[in-house]
Amino acid sequence: MAHWLVKSEPEAYSWQQMQKDKKTGWSGVRNYQAANNMKAMKIGDTCFFYHSNEGKEIVGIVSVSKLYHPDPSDEDGKFGMVEMSAGKSFKTPVTLAEIKVHAKLKDMAFVKQSRLSVSPVTADEWKIICGLGGVK
């Protein structure tokens, strides 16, 4: 099983909405590297749900429930999407500022390529962030 981080601006799609919906298509990604990361996802892979722009914090965990497939919002047909299912909420959101100053997290792909909307997370990074967020 692999781990990932996916970003969403809370005004566009929030963690609260994700919990209400229980699952959603992760659509609208228009970056080739982020799309390649989604193509690599397997069912059951887990992802941190990150509020970008406003909040700048990891607030929960989602899991991949449907593999990469065409994104109907892409008129050119170049990009796809995956389906995500809601998981656990973080007891304590983990902020970008906390991640940047943590010695073992400062080299995360998410930090190094901050504009990328879907990025890989190592097993060690996953464990540290879950600990900081109060989830197992």
Image (cartoon, helix red, strand yellow):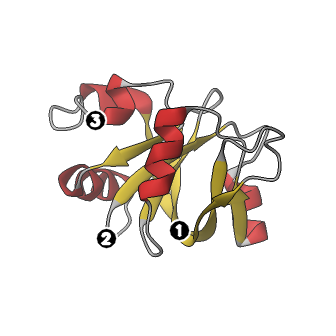
For discs 3 and 2, the disc positioned in front in the rendered view: 2
Locate residue 134 relative to residue 9 in the image: left or right: left
User: From where the camera sits, is residue 26 visible?
Assistant: yes
- Label 1 sits on residue: 64
Q: Quadrant of the N terminus?
A: bottom left
For discs 3 and 1, the disc positioned in front in the rendered view: 1
Locate residue 10 relative to residue 58 in the image: left or right: right
Q: Secondary structure at mark 3?
A: loop
For marks 3 and 2, give the CA distance: 18 Å
Mark number for residue 1? Answer: 2
Callout 3: few (<14), some (14-19), or many (20+) C-alpha neighbours within 10 Å? Answer: some
Q: Secondary structure at mark 2?
A: loop
Q: Residue at x 32, y 49 (%)?
A: 121
N-terminal of the two: label 1 or label 2? Answer: 2
Q: Residue at x 38, y 66 (%)?
A: 135
Q: Amino acid at mark 2?
A: Met
Q: Is residue 84 above or below residue 118?
A: below
- Label 3 sits on residue: 108
94 or 120, nearer to the observer: 120
Callout 1: few (<14), some (14-19), or many (20+) C-alpha neighbours within 10 Å? Answer: many
- When asked about the image quadrant of residue 81, the answer is bottom right
For marks 1 and 2, give the CA distance: 11 Å
The percent coordinates of residue 102 (x first, y second) are 22, 33
Locate residue 117 relative to residue 100 in the image: left or right: right
The percent coordinates of residue 75 (x first, y second) are 84, 40
25 or 75, nearer to the observer: 75
